Image (cartoon, rainbow, N blue to C red):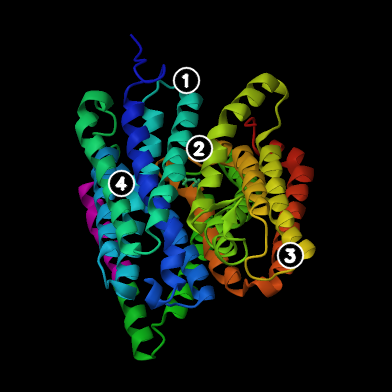
Amino acid sequence: ATDKGFFGHPKGLSTLFFTELWERFSYYGMRAILIFYMYYSVANGGLDLDKSTSIALMSIYGSLIYMTGVLGGWLADRVFGTRKAVFLGGVLIMVGHIVLSLPNSGITGLFSAMVLLAVGTGLLKPNVSSMIGDLYDPKDVRRAGGFSIFYMGINLGGFLAPYVTGSFMDNFHLGFLVAAVGMALGLAFFLITQNKFLGDAGKTVTNPIAKEERGRVAILFSSIAVGLLIIACVAYAFDVLTIKYVINFISCVAIILPIVYFIVMLRSKKTDSDEKSRLLAYIPLFITAVMFWMIQEQGSSVLAVFASDRVTGSFFGWTISPAFYQSFNPLFVIFLSPVFAMIWTKLGDRQPSTPRKFALGLFFAGLSFLIMMLPGILGGTEMHSASPIWLVLSFLLVTIGELCLSPVGLGVTTQLAPRAFAAQTMGVWFLSNSMAQGINAQIGQVFSADIEIQYFGILGTIAVVIGIILFIITPKLLKLMKGIK
Ligand code: GLN
């Protein structure tokens, strides 16, 4: 008999749903206050970094946590099995947030937590997502619905978190502690329910490293570690081991890594000619996704600064913490997901192809930035003078875009990635976000109220133009995609 214990879906979905809900609660809870922690003065409990460095560090944090998905997928496939990988990842994330929660942890704490969160999220996020796929038979029609429910879980966590952590703006460390507790709850739920609900899913190591490979792998990993250490030592010797250079270094890696990965996939002997053609079609989609996440992810850096500095303190009469604005994107995802599901089902065969959905997604993201030119144009760029309505509208538009692009993105990556790289597919998709935030770390630094009109205008226009180009070349891409729509 098929298992229908969780809203008509396998009971195992509830384990993964709540584990990821709490993981995202802790991530977005931390993120909602992190930027203020970095640039508020010491007297106000912050680190007193300058604003542009803080914006860049927000992006670097985000870039790193999505950069490690490929590694996490590989480790699960070859060393740990998905289930152990998820658990281990959760523990590292919790420890990362505990480090941030220690009073006086300062800059050292900020960077140590960054490393822990990067490795932890790389182990947890792609693997918890791929286990969803394992819950269903290949022919089970409930699979897509399962992923939608899961995406809502992600956003439920993201929605609730800023309300809790946002009330700790006078003691950021307590807010980070709340994030750690959130992850602990997720881990506890995972431990208690996994054996009952997940059966054997994710227990075995699918493709264990053969004995003769072990030496090679050990050499590869240790040379990466030694390489990083040498770079750090040289940087230290030349006195450039500064925040600025760390940011630049991570930006470079975030941009180069996906390019190298695509070259490796294209040149691999295991990739056949149809797969090569599909991979070529995937590249413009990947670029579109990068531009999309560049805008979407600035919601928690550039737009957070806007919320704190430019928007009037009152939200239609209520005084609210600027961190609360972080909950609009997830809130809109929760409300609009069912609407989109209905629209796609209604359209059936007439629904737009994947590249067209991507084009639409980027188009809306572009609009979400173009609309942010208006408060400055209409009312000037004085501190605390803008109506909050613009931010809310901007979050609404970008979320409409997100629902066109993000849920289909994961699916199309699975279909277009070569079979030999299947275990890292989720990681490849997350690399689009990592690259986006690597680029954001550079461009976000120029943001200030003085140039906000140009800033939103230029990025918004680029996004709309790329969206239109993608729309035009869609027929060519569909040919290259060989039967996948
Ligand atoms: N907001 C989504 C999440 O946190 C988007 C991540 C992504 O790059 N797909 O899961």
3 or 1: tag closer to the N-terminus: 1
Q: Residues within 10 Å of mark 3 (few under 14, many from 20)?
A: some
Assess whether residue 414 is covered by the magenta stretch. no
Residue topped by disc 4:
182
CA separation, marks 4 and 3? Answer: 38 Å
Q: Is residue 130 left or right of residue 198?
A: right
Q: Where does residue 180 sit, x and y in percent of width and height?
A: 28, 52
Residue at 71%, 42% in the rendered image: 360
Residue topped by disc 3:
376
Dot 3 amino acid type: Gly
For the residues carrying marks 4 and 2, which lies nearer the camera in this image?
4
* Disc assigned to residue 142: 1
Q: Where does residue 11 sit, x and y in percent of width and height?
A: 32, 22
Q: Where does residue 322 sit, x and y in percent of width and height?
A: 51, 58
Q: Which residues are magenta?
A: 208-225
Dot 2 amino acid type: Thr
Dot 1 amino acid type: Arg
Q: Is residue 57 left or right of residue 344?
A: left
By secondary structure, the bulk of the magenta-drawn segment is best described as: helix
For the residues carrying marks 3 and 1, which lies nearer the camera in this image?
3
Under circle 3, the secondary element is helix
CA separation, marks 1 and 4? Answer: 29 Å
Dot 4 amino acid type: Gly
2 or 3: tag closer to the N-terminus: 3
1 or 4: tag closer to the N-terminus: 1
1 or 2: tag closer to the N-terminus: 1
For the residues carrying marks 4 and 3, which lies nearer the camera in this image?
3
**Which residue ends up furthest to the bottom in the rendered image?**
238
Residue at 24%, 27% in the rendered image: 200
For the residues carrying marks 1 and 2, which lies nearer the camera in this image?
1
Residue topped by disc 2:
414
Residue 393 or residue 213, whichever sits in front: 393
